[in-house]
């Protein structure tokens, strides 16, 4: 029994930390005056199976997602909390003569410039490395938009359509745009889908590397009294 549990945990850790998760965002609207429906789904590798949230103007529900598609049933409806009005009694105005003068707060102690510079030297280089490598933990699976789009100015609508055709001429296989210009009505109607991959293993690796790098620089400055460079 323990061996089976161990292999199950090992397989789950492999799926979660090695294989990328899939986060899908979807927004659709039947016509420009209709309310917007938003769907958010988080699934395992290639969105084979996961859980999703559907947000509508008067309803929020949780569904099971299958390949980034929310299954209508079974679902769990989330109830909105009504904010109760506060019934605190209004106190009568007090006599100014009876009010005791409040003690003045002591001035806030300013941090030493040397301490701030030391922490800047410790954390700047690890932060730069983290910011440079952190986007690698995310990947774009696909981005698509289908429907009709109109702006206030018909000339801007036509120019936007021209930019779309020029963008679609580029070799972006994960980008699909099919927006029909609507010169007579302002607004958007259609569907927009975005799916990104999240690599939890890379996020954990970069976080541990940042912590180790910062800890080593802190130990060098603390125990060797060496002046570190900011970059």
Image (cartoon, helix red, strand yellow):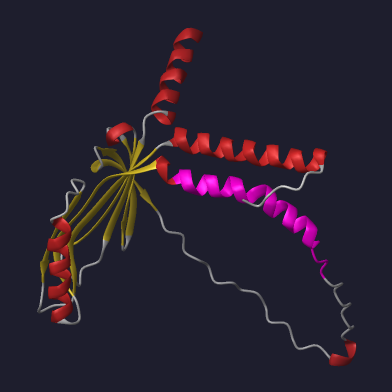
Residue beneath the point at 84% across and 72% down: 107
Query: Which x, y percent locates residue 45?
Result: 32, 32
Query: Which x, y percent locates residue 132?
Result: 48, 47
Q: Which image quarter: residue 199? A: top left
The one of 15 and 169 positioned closer to us in this rendering: 169
49 left or right of 3? left
The total of numbered circles placed on residues is 0
Query: Which x, y percent locates residue 65?
Result: 28, 39
Query: Main SS of the magenta segment?
Result: helix
Query: Which x, y percent locates residue 111?
Result: 79, 62
> Is residue 214 shown in magenta?
no
217 left or right of 95? left
Q: Which residues are magenta?
A: 108-134
> Is residue 132 shown in magenta?
yes
130 lies above or below 33:
above
Evaluate whether residue 1 shows in this view. no
Residue beneath the point at 78% across and 62% down: 113
């Amino acid at each position: 029994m323990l061996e089976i549990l161990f292999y199950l945990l090992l397989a789950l850790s492999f799926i979660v930390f090695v294989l990328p998760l899939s986060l899908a965002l979807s927004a659709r609207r039947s016509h420009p005056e209709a309310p917007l429906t938003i769907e958010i789904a988080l699934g395992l590798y290639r969105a084979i199976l996961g859980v999703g949230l559907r947000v509508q103007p008067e309803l929020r529900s949780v569904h099971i997602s299958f390949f980034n598609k929310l299954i209508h049933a079974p679902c769990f409806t989330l109830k909105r909390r009504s904010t109760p009005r506060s019934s605190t009694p209004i106190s009568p105005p007090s006599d100014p003569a009876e009010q005791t003068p409040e003690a003045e707060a002591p001035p806030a102690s300013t941090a030493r410039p040397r301490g701030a510079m030391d922490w800047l030297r410790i954390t700047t280089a690890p932060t730069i490395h983290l910011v440079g490598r952190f986007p690698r933990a995310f990947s774009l699976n696909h981005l698509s938009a289908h429907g009709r789009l109109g702006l206030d100015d018909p000339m801007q609508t036509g120019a936007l359509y021209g930019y779309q055709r020029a963008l679609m001429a580029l070799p972006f296989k994960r980008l699909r745009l099919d927006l029909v210009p609507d010169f007579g009505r302002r607004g958007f109607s259609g569907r927009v889908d975005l799916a990104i991959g999240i690599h939890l293993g890379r996020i954990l690796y970069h976080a541990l590397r940042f912590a180790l790098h910062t800890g080593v620089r802190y130990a060098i400055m603390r125990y060797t009294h060496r002046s570190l460079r900011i970059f």
